[in-house]
Amino acid sequence: MSNQIEGHVASIGANGGLITNISADQIAHIPRDDSVRIKFGGHETLGIFPANHNQPEATMVASLGAGGFLEIEIVGISLSEMLGIRTNTPVVIDW
């Protein structure tokens, strides 16, 4: 049986990244490897990275943002504009 956390996109960051309402406390106990799937708006990314990840340009990454909430971005590209994701889009974490 898988575990799951449900939330939504609370806001769009200045760089077009998605800021969710899923807090650091909610994800503190879950793995950080590729067994974790973050699904939103018909898209998916694997794993939760540290905020200071050094992933290459155009990589989709979920990380714990400076504000203490899960953020999803495409490095160097506005994810919101590229994929048309807006606030209130459901976000589901499975592991």
Image (tube, helix red, strand yellow):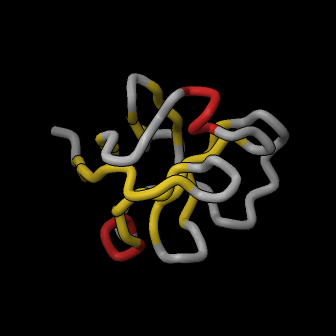
Q: Is residue 86 left or right of residue 6?
A: right
Quadrant of the drawing holding the N terminus: top left
**Front-most of residues 61 and 80:** 80
Q: Could you tell me residue 63's position as x and y percent?
A: 57, 58
Tell whether 92 sits left or right of 79. left
The residue located at (39%, 50%) in the rendering is 9
Q: Residue 94: x and y, percent?
A: 31, 42
- Please identify the residue farthest to the top as the structure is shown: 42
Residue 76 vs 19, above or below: the answer is above
Q: From what the image shows, is residue 69 above or below residue 81?
A: below
- Residue 33 at x, y = what percent? 53, 48
Q: Residue at x 77, y 33 (%)?
A: 58
Q: Residue at x 63, y 47 (%)?
A: 16
Q: How many callouts does the rendering have?
A: 0
**Position of residue 15 measured from the top left corner of the image (x, y, whole percent):** 70, 52
Asked whether, in this view, residue 78 is left or right of residue 29, the answer is: right
Q: Is residue 81 left or right of residue 15?
A: left
Q: Is residue 94 visible?
A: no
Residue in front for this viewpoint, 7 or 63: 7
* Residue in view at x 22 percent, y 47 percent: 3
Q: Quadrant of residue 52?
A: bottom right
